[in-house]
């Protein structure tokens, strides 16, 4: 749907520009036709040719941008990124919405620094502070987390930790507490994430891992049963391994990093 909207938004100005050159060409033709039809025709063709030269770069950028968005929708991240880069090199302007798709392609390729640069380039600064979409701030928090910049990441997540963002925000806040050795804070963060989305497997996994490590087998079983009972299956082998770990009374579940696909 977004690609169709983008196509219309790009073609309307092109159609208006073409109409303008047709009007100018016709006006010039009518002006010179009584004096010389040959000159009038040459002038008309020249105006149309000039219009084509002016519109060609715009149409070329439009084609590249549409290709980038189509590649993004098909999860072809390297292709999408390459087309976004080409679009910028051709002089194309991006919006915050386009930057989100571009940055998401880079995030899916785990190119955190480049994704952060793209996101920051679309942020508007006003006298009252930063004006950005909540999703932009959310993705900035993710990029900074995976670069190990936890203080900056935490500020970003806390700034947008409400509504539909709560699952991801509380999960990453818990991960940072986990990485800092604050097991109780991490467990509470994972629980908050699961209150919003009980089927969110990364929070389920780490919550069970920490609960088993602390000897709370019943708590781990409760998290697992809620996950399965609400329809969560995750990766089936992963789910089965969690169940076995709980029934075995623990064991060492590895501290894994989950990468969330952005689309």
Image (cartoon, helix red, strand yellow):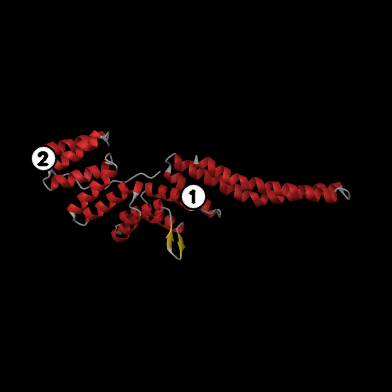
Dots 1, 2 in contact, CB < 8 A: no
Quadrant location of the C terminus in the rendered image: top left
Residue 37 lies, in percent from the top left, at: 86, 46
Question: Which residue sits at x=36%, y=44%?
Answer: 261
Residue 250 shows in the view: no
Q: Residues within 10 Å of mark 1 (few under 14, many from 20)?
A: many
Q: Nearer the viewer, residue 9 or 192?
A: 192
Q: Real-space Cα distance between discs 1 and 2?
A: 50 Å
Find the residue positioned furthest to the bottom: 127
On residue 249, the disc is: 2
Q: What residue is drawn where x is 27% and y is 53%?
A: 173
**155 on left or right of 225:** right
Q: Residues within 10 Å of mark 2 (few under 14, many from 20)?
A: some
Query: Compared with residue 73, is residue 85 higher up or lower down, i.e. above or below?
Result: below
Task: Looking at the image, tell me whether mark 1 or mark 2 is earlier in sequence order.
Answer: 1
Identify residue for label 1. Answer: 84
At mark 1, the secondary structure is helix
Q: Which mark is residue 76?
A: none
- What secondary structure is found at the residue carrying circle 2? loop
Asked whether residue 149 is in view, the answer is: yes
| Image coords of residue 65 (percent x, y) | 52, 47
Q: Position of residue 45 (x, y in %)?
A: 76, 47
**Nearer the viewer's eye, disc 1 or disc 2?**
2
**Residue 79 in the image, given as x and y percentages of width and height:** 46, 44
User: Quarter of the image holding residue 160?
Assistant: bottom left
Q: Is residue 185 above or below residue 237?
A: below
């Amino acid at each position: 749907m977004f690609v169709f909207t983008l196509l219309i938004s790009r073609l309307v100005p092109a159609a208006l520009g073409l109409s303008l050159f047709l009007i100018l060409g016709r006006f010039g033709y009518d002006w010179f036709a009584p004096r010389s039809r040959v000159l009038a025709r040459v002038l008309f063709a020249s105006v149309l040719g000039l219009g084509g030269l002016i519109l060609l770069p715009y149409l070329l950028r439009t084609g590249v941008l549409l290709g980038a968005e189509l590649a993004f929708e098909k999860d072809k991240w390297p292709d999408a990124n390459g087309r976004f880069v080409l679009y910028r090199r051709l002089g194309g302007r991006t919006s915050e919405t386009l930057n989100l798709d571009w940055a998401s392609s880079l995030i899916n390729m785990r190119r955190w620094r480049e994704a952060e640069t793209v996101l920051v380039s679309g942020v508007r600064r006003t006298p009252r502070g930063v004006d950005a979409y909540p999703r932009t701030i959310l993705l900035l928090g993710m990029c900074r987390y995976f670069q190990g910049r936890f203080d900056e990441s935490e500020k970003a997540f806390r700034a947008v930790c409400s509504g539909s963002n709560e699952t991801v925000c509380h999960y990453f806040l818990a991960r940072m507490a986990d990485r800092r050795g604050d097991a109780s804070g991490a467990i509470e963060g994972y629980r908050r994430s699961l209150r919003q989305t009980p089927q969110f497997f990364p929070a389920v996994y780490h919550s069970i891992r920490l609960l088993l490590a602390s000897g709370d087998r019943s708590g781990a079983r409760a998290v697992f049963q809620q996950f399965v009972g609400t329809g969560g299956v995750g990766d089936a082998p992963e789910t089965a391994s969690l169940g076995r770990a709980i029934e075995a009374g623990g064991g060492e579940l590895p501290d894994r990093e989950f990468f969330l696909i952005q689309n």
